[in-house]
Image: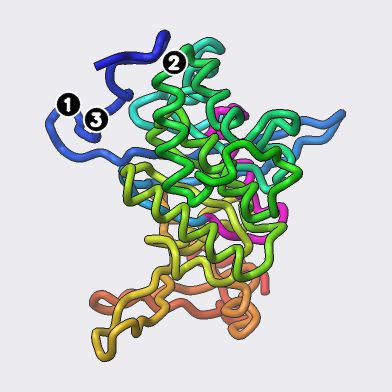
Amino acid sequence: MRVFEGAPETFPGDGLGQDGSAIPYIECRDLFKIYKRADLEVVALRGVDLEVEKAEMIAIVGASGSGKTTLLNILSGLDRPSAGAVRVGGRDLLNISDRELVMYRRMESGFVWQATGRNLVPYLSVADNVELPMAIARVDAGGRRRRRMELLDALGMGDKAERLPHELSGGEQQRVAIGVAMANRPPLLLADEPTGELDTQTAVQVFQLLRDMNRQYQVTVVVVTHYPGVAEHVDRAVHITDGRISSESTLRPTFQRPGDSVHEEYLVVDRVGRLQLPQEYLERLSIQGLAKADISGDQLTLRRAAKGARSESGEEAAP
């Protein structure tokens, strides 16, 4: 087996712990990211807990400013976390040297940007764009050509290998961008709003291509997106709110008729017991400040604390 110079013979982490038990390919524990701007501190991530299995395809969804792109940038090695723990394929991305980080970005993670112009070198042909990451990794010419032909055929772009990026449609540019991201056979593929500039029909095609890459090459895929129908294309959708994972949703087959499925959403309770209630729940129950929780069997009941409720110390609780 030929090994790229500077790359490990096998990808870090084989999915097994020291005791032989399965471990997640991506593992975030109490992850924080704080940006300092002048005298201000902006907390983008507030204790994120996340696990992604090897060869799983997930979407991270949330409002603008929720922290989803920050999380993706940390997983890609483009940004460093402030605190907590984040491991991808056995690599500790909190404690990693600059040199190791370069090799991680080059060989172990592929990235697709939202803006199509950021993914491709404008004066290089489609073929040369796909071969460029391999050339940087010092893959021989024959290996680059074979891999490029394989990827472009898989992406339906084999007949456009000699075109320049400006001669392609937006959807075609994103297809080539996926090829560039997959050129060095990374075990992780990341995409930041890859359909943000595309129409609905083309967006569906891009998601299907990402799913095809996921299944054909067993690559783990994480996509940040606002696309409303993303649940149909991923194993699960992870919802992030105010820098924390709040819920997960998935489509479950009903088996009543072929193709029928039902959308299910689950709230996420993190390792220390934190739970984020959806905004509509808060508005309906008018919960603010104090609340009461009761357990009966395997059910938890949450309700507003009555105004003037007193604590055990005899002090009056705030309304």
Q: Quadrant of the image for the C terminus?
A: bottom right
Where does the image place residue 213, in percent across and percent down from the top left?
Answer: 40, 48
- Give the class, few, some or many, for how many residues have Cα within 10 Å of label 3's Cα (few <14, many ≥20): some
Badge 1 local density, few (<14 within 10 Å), some, or many (20+)? few
Q: Quadrant of the N terminus?
A: top left
Q: What residue type is labelled 2?
A: Val
Q: What residue type is labelled 1?
A: Gln
> In the rendering, which numbered label is found on residue 14?
3
Pair 3/2: label in front: 2
Is residue 316 something that shows in the picture?
Answer: no
Residue nearest the observer in this picture, 40 or 301: 40
Q: Is mark 2 on a helix, strand or loop?
A: loop
Give me the C-alpha separation between circle 2 and circle 1: 33 Å
**Is residue 129 rendered to the left or right of residue 58?**
right
User: At label 3, which amino acid type do we have?
Assistant: Asp
> Which label number is shown at residue 139?
2
Where is mark 1, residue-wise? 18
Looking at the image, the residue that sits furthest to the left is 20
User: Which segment did they paint magenta?
Assistant: 60-80
Furthest-bottom residue in this view: 256
Task: Identify which residue is drawn at 33% across, 82% down.
Answer: 259
**Eyeballing the image, is 204 above or below 163?**
below
The percent position of residue 279, horizontal first and vertical second, equals 62, 73
Q: Distance between the residues labelled 3 and 1?
A: 11 Å
Q: Which residue lies furthest to the right in this view?
A: 38
Residue mark closest to the camera, 2 vs 1? 2
User: Residue 110 colored magenta?
Assistant: no
